[in-house]
Image (spheres, grey):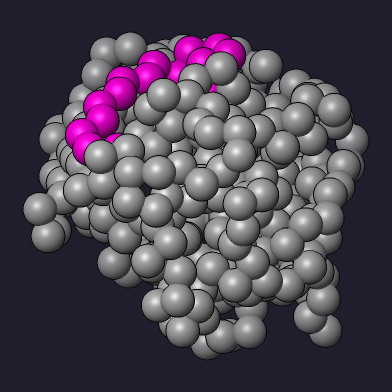
């Protein structure tokens, strides 16, 4: 896969698509990844709607964080796209800066519950290097958000490659407390995180479906637990698959910053809501961040032409 210290932006070499089922909607949906221009960032296009609205993959477009991350347009309740985090993690982990994602439904297909199928699609399409310089979002001072016993801290770090740390704790003896640190150097996302699947508990399923969630969930696209027992015939893909999947979600949710992070992320029992609150807290403090060329130390925040420039000015 592409190196995370590549100094120039990248997009897909060719379009590529797949079809699957939405985890929460249960609807069949087709997805096509397409190349995009320099500085375009990542965006979703709902091609099933009359005006084919484009929804930027940005923190200030997050409208729901219940068991997934959903993006939408203000004043347009029909113009939304759910469960974006696994695909965004795959794009970020594969070094894709610019892409348009066409969907004919309201949710990214869940595939096997991990990011591995999307990494495979990206590899099949190939990447092409563009001429525009790549930039990073550098964390300048600690930013911490806390809620309900969970916390997430964004910290400065001198390295160019970001580091993500996650600790989770569940009553189930199949999980208990798990902790993992991953440094997203070249190949690390595919090797360490991509195959980790989303997970849930049998006793939650009825309540989730009553809430309009998990209607497409099955043993084919999630790790399902009954107490201490993993119900999937093949068992786990990693002994600590649960914390690895939480890290996968974290990478995807924080990709909504619009640029790769330059810093360290330390999360304790964090989920989609806290991940988004951390970005909102970061951008609320202009002293806490700056945009820098990937391989330089000089700030280029003023006048930079990236999706982040617009996001930084958005209300929190």
Q: Position of residue 292 (x, y in %)?
A: 40, 26
Q: Is residue 120 magenta?
A: no
Q: Position of residue 270 (x, y in %)?
A: 26, 48
Left or right: 118, with 267 as reference point: right
Task: State the image quarter where residue 28 is shown.
Answer: bottom right
Front-lying residue, 129 or 91: 91
Tell me the magenta residue range: 175-189
> What residue is rendered at 45% in x and 42% in y?
230
> What residue is rendered at 16% in x and 50% in y?
150
The quadrant of the image that shows the N terminus is top right
Front-lying residue, 281 or 20: 20
Residue 179 visible? The answer is: yes
> What residue is rendered at 77% in x and 57% in y?
20
Q: Position of residue 62 (x, y in %)?
A: 44, 65
The quadrant of the image that shows the C terminus is bottom left
Left or right: 75, with 55 as reference point: left
Q: Is residue 188 magenta?
A: yes
Left or right: 232, with 312 as reference point: right
Q: Is residue 266 above or below residue 55?
A: above
Q: Is residue 125 above or below residue 204?
A: above
Q: Is residue 212 above or below residue 181?
A: below
Q: How many marks?
A: 0
Task: State the image quarter where residue 59 is shown.
Answer: bottom left
Task: State the image quarter where residue 254 is shown.
Answer: top left
Front-lying residue, 300 or 151: 151
Left or right: 13, with 179 as reference point: right
> What residue is rendered at 31% in x and 21% in y?
181
Q: Position of residue 265 (x, y in %)?
A: 27, 32
């Amino acid at each position: 896969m592409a190196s995370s210290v590549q100094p120039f932006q990248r997009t897909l070499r060719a379009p590529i698509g797949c079809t699957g089922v939405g985890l929460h909607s249960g609807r069949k949906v087709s997805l096509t990844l397409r190349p995009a221009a320099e500085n375009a960032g990542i965006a979703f296009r709902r091609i099933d709607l009359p005006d084919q609205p484009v929804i930027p993959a940005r923190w200030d477009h997050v409208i729901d964080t219940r068991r997934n991350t959903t993006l939408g347009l203000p004043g347009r309740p029909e113009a939304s796209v759910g469960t974006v985090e696994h695909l965004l993690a795959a794009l970020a982990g594969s070094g894709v800066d610019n892409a348009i994602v066409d969907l004919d439904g309201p949710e990214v297909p869940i595939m096997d519950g991990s990011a591995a199928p999307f990494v495979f699609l990206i590899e099949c399409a190939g990447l092409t290097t563009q001429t525009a310089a790549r930039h990073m979002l550098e964390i300048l001072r600690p930013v911490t958000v806390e809620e309900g016993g969970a916390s997430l801290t964004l910290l400065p770090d001198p390295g160019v490659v970001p580091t993500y740390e996650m600790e989770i704790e569940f009553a189930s003896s199949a999980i208990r407390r798990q902790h993992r640190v991953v440094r997203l150097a070249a190949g690390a996302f595919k090797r360490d995180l991509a195959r980790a699947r989303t997970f849930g508990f049998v006793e939650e399923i009825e309540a989730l479906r009553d809430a309009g969630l998990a209607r497409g969930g099955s043993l084919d696209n999630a790790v399902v637990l009954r107490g201490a027992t993993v119900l999937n015939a093949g068992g786990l893909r990693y002994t600590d698959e649960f914390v690895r999947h939480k890290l996968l979600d974290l990478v995807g949710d924080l990709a909504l910053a619009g640029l790769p992070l330059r810093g360290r992320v330390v999360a304790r029992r964090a989920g989609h809501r806290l991940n988004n609150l951390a970005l909102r807290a970061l951008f609320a403090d202009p002293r806490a961040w700056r945009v820098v060329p990937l391989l330089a130390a000089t700030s280029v925040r003023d006048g930079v032409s990236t999706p982040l420039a617009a996001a930084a000015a958005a209300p929190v």
